[in-house]
Amino acid sequence: MKIEDFIGLEVLSGDARVIGTVEGVGVDVTSWRVPVLKIGIKKGMEESLGIKKPRFGSTTIYVRTEEIESISDMITLKPELENSKEAIIEGKVDIPTAGSIVGTRVIARGGKQMGFVDNFLFAPKKDWAIACMMVKMEKAVLSELKIKKPRIGTPVIKVLTEDIKTIGDMVMLKIDLQELRDYLDKKPRKKRVEEPKDRPSASSGLPPEFRDDQVDEEEQRARRLENL
């Protein structure tokens, strides 16, 4: 699912009371999962939720994703309204929303600018794991990555979150353009895997490229991207 699949969805308590609507999707950039949803509270629901109503403006809370029962045309929480306090977090949360990261520049290892964050894909049914980041590419790198420019629009590629090194003023990847091109083109690069000194194997006398436990990281990336 993408960010826009959630924005604007109504949030219900377990006893079918409308609490509010989704305004944002929290992103934990360490574990790469969605721990919370940002919810704009329906006017007049503050007292029922046990939340202090602000003098000005609307009330915003965060709902823990672990307290979500189901997702369809709307989001239903596990607790009923009178017990929904346990599912929410009041005030500010030190977790960025996906929307605040969208538009951030993305640079490959080596400092080459690739493009800008366009979206995230995450799986509510798999512990809200964030599988990959979608990057809107810059024209300057299309030829290097062998990406054909469409007649209309801008190419968007998927980058696995495991290949993200850090997020600050920019999103920095662990991989360079050559490595990215390899698994976008499904042309894996063989990498040498050293045998642990204290764990000899039956194939340890063979050259690395012929060992049974050879790990082909680029091919694994390509398969995961293909399945998204």
Image (spheres, rainbow, N blue to C red):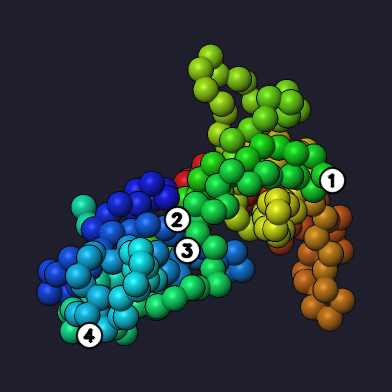
Q: Which residue is mark 4?
A: 83
Element assignment for label 2: strand
Amino acid type, callout 2:
Phe
Residue 62 x %, y %: 39, 71
Q: Which residue is mark 1?
A: 110
Which mark is first along the chain, 4 or 2? 4
Amino acid type, callout 4:
Asn
Circle 4: is it few (<14), some (14-19), or many (20+) Cα within 10 Å? some
Element assignment for label 3: loop
Left or right: residue 18 versus residue 177 is left
Residue 104 x %, y %: 63, 46
Which mark is first along the chain, 1 or 4? 4
Cβ–Cβ under 8 Å for marks 2 and 4: no
Residue at image point 30% right, 52% down: 8
The label shown at residue 26 is 3
Amino acid type, callout 3:
Gly
Marks 4/1: CA–CA distance = 51 Å
Amino acid type, callout 1:
Gly
Cβ–Cβ under 8 Å for marks 2 and 1: no
Which mark is first along the chain, 3 or 4? 3
Residue at image point 84% right, 64% down: 194
Marks 3/2: CA–CA distance = 11 Å
Residue 74 x %, y %: 22, 57
